[in-house]
Image (cartoon, helix red, strand yellow):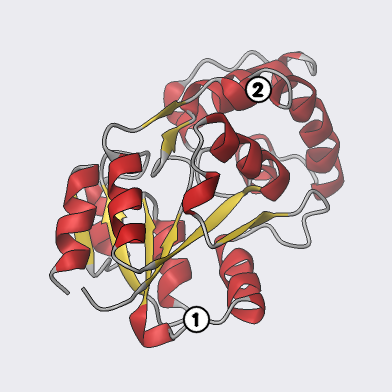
Amino acid sequence: MDKKYILFDLDGTIVDSGKGIKSSIKYSLKKLGIEENREEILNDFIGPPLIDSYIKHYNFSEEEADDIMQIYREYYKDNGLYENFIYEGIEEVICELKDKGNEIILATSKPEIFARRVLEQHKLTKYFDFISGATLDHKISKKTDVIKYILDNYRIEIEKAYMIGDTKYDILGGKSFGLKTVGVTYGYGSKKELEISRADYIVEDTYQIFEILKNI
């Protein structure tokens, strides 16, 4: 296997963090007198920057959405953050890719401070050569912002780089910088969404990630 630079999304790709994120969203909205139990709306928060989803679904201004994010974090930082589980096989896949001499990078729209805690929770930090996420001040928030930060601060050979994720934001973000892309269907994005985004490869389970990359 030739050395590759492999960027992994976190939520919906390495861990299923849906329960914690959705509990935190419901908590924040309830504080404003809004009861939200529609799964299709709650699921739509997983992937893009949360502030964008608050604006999209509830017509908050950017300032209002920023305020509600502070309420969200009241619950998330001590409770919701840890309401997640690691996908079956993903640690073995990451370990195997690392052992083959590849460089493993985290590229998540989750704030980096929280992403590091999730990796520590599952004892995954040791596999990563570089960890990048959003900033709490929203200066880095979208997947394209995160990938640009990585490219500006970590030496990567673009022609050997891959972005792995479960939503269109991962695929379009990777493609915007010339990375090859691998979409996973076991997360929160649909196969149709990944196809429309023109992912280079689409896999149905964690083990297929390794099978794809070892044969390229």
Point 38% across, 44% down: residue: 13
Between residues 71 and 97, which one lies in front from this camera angle? 97
Position above or below: 215 against 38: below
In the figure, is residue 109 to the left or right of 113?
A: left
The secondary structure type at the circle numbered 2 is helix
Name the image quarter holding residue 31: top right
Q: Which of marks 2 and 1 precedes in the sequence?
A: 2
Please provide percent x and percent y for residue 179: 39, 77
- Front residue of 82 and 38: 82
Looking at the image, residue 66 sits to the left or right of residue 120; the answer is: right
- Locate residue 198: give its quadrant: bottom left
Indicate the amino acid at tag 2. Ser
Q: Is residue 68 above or below residue 56?
A: above
Q: CA distance from mark 1 to mark 2?
A: 35 Å
- Name the disc covering residue 24, or none: 2
Q: Are marks 1 and 2 in contact (CB under 8 Å)?
A: no
Amino acid of disc 1: Ile
User: Residue at label 1?
Assistant: 156
Callout 1: helix, strand or loop? loop
Give how far across and how far down residue 104 sits, in percent: 44, 62
The residue under the point 35% across, 51% down is: 94
> How many numbered tags mark residues here?
2
Quarter holding the N terminus is bottom left
User: Percent position (x, y) of residue 215?
Assistant: 13, 70
